[in-house]
Image: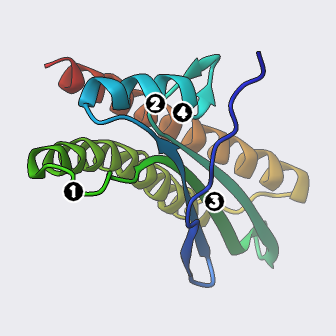
Amino acid sequence: MPAPAIARLRPRVSGESSPELALSFVETSYLVTGSTVAQWLESMALLGPLRGGERRAAHTDWRLTWSYVPARVAAGHAVGAVRVRLAVETILPAWIPPPRAEPELLAAWETLSRRIERHERGHREVGIAGARSLVAALRALPPEGDLARLHETATAAAAAVLEAAHAQDADWDRAESREWER
């Protein structure tokens, strides 16, 4: 049986930019069905975004890319202009309440969706912090005697920042999973 398609309801695109840092955010939704929390969760398990071979209620992916322009200095070469780009894509569940839905049902959806959105916002914040750390790390690199060595140093610094950010993202999931189990 083929995987169900994700309905993209009202995609939202936003971002901000400075000379060194560009942030872009795309948020899309897929439609869940049901009139109880259990039915919503079942619908999410069938229709939610597929990551790591499992369906999720929601998912946030972020990607960091970077570049710099080398500058000639007395000691050789240094990092000149830096450009870091963060692209964040979030997929959230959406529910269309039936006509004359009970206030308790509406409140239950509001509680569940806010909790999911808060969790995904945490992933987004980790990505933003990683992007800012990457700008700082590249700016802090000392000059190198040759261009190849500067590139190696910049690449190693970027890899370390990315590794730390991905570890923080995984830590966020672990901490949040304990909260969801309560």
Q: Please state the horizontal and vertical placement of residue 11, each as a whole percent of the image.
A: 58, 65
Q: Earlier in the sequence, mark 1 or mark 2?
A: 2
Colour mapping used in the image: rainbow
| Disc 1/disc 2 C-alpha distance (Å) | 23 Å
Image quarter of the N terminus: top right
- As drawn, the label of residue 44 is 2
Alpha-carbon distance for marks 2 and 4? 5 Å
Helix, strand or loop at label 4? It is loop
Snapshot quadrant of residue 22: bottom right
Could you tell me if the residues under marks 2 and 4 are in contact, i.e. CB atoms within 8 Å?
yes
Mark 4 closeness class: few <14, some 14–19, many ≥20 residues within 10 Å = many
Q: Which label sits in the foreground, 2 or 3? A: 2
Instruction: Tell me which amino acid carries mark 2.
Output: Met
Residue 159, placed above or below residue 179: below
Residue 41 lies left or right of residue 92; in this view the side is: left
- Badge 1 element: loop
Dot 1 corresponds to which residue? 100
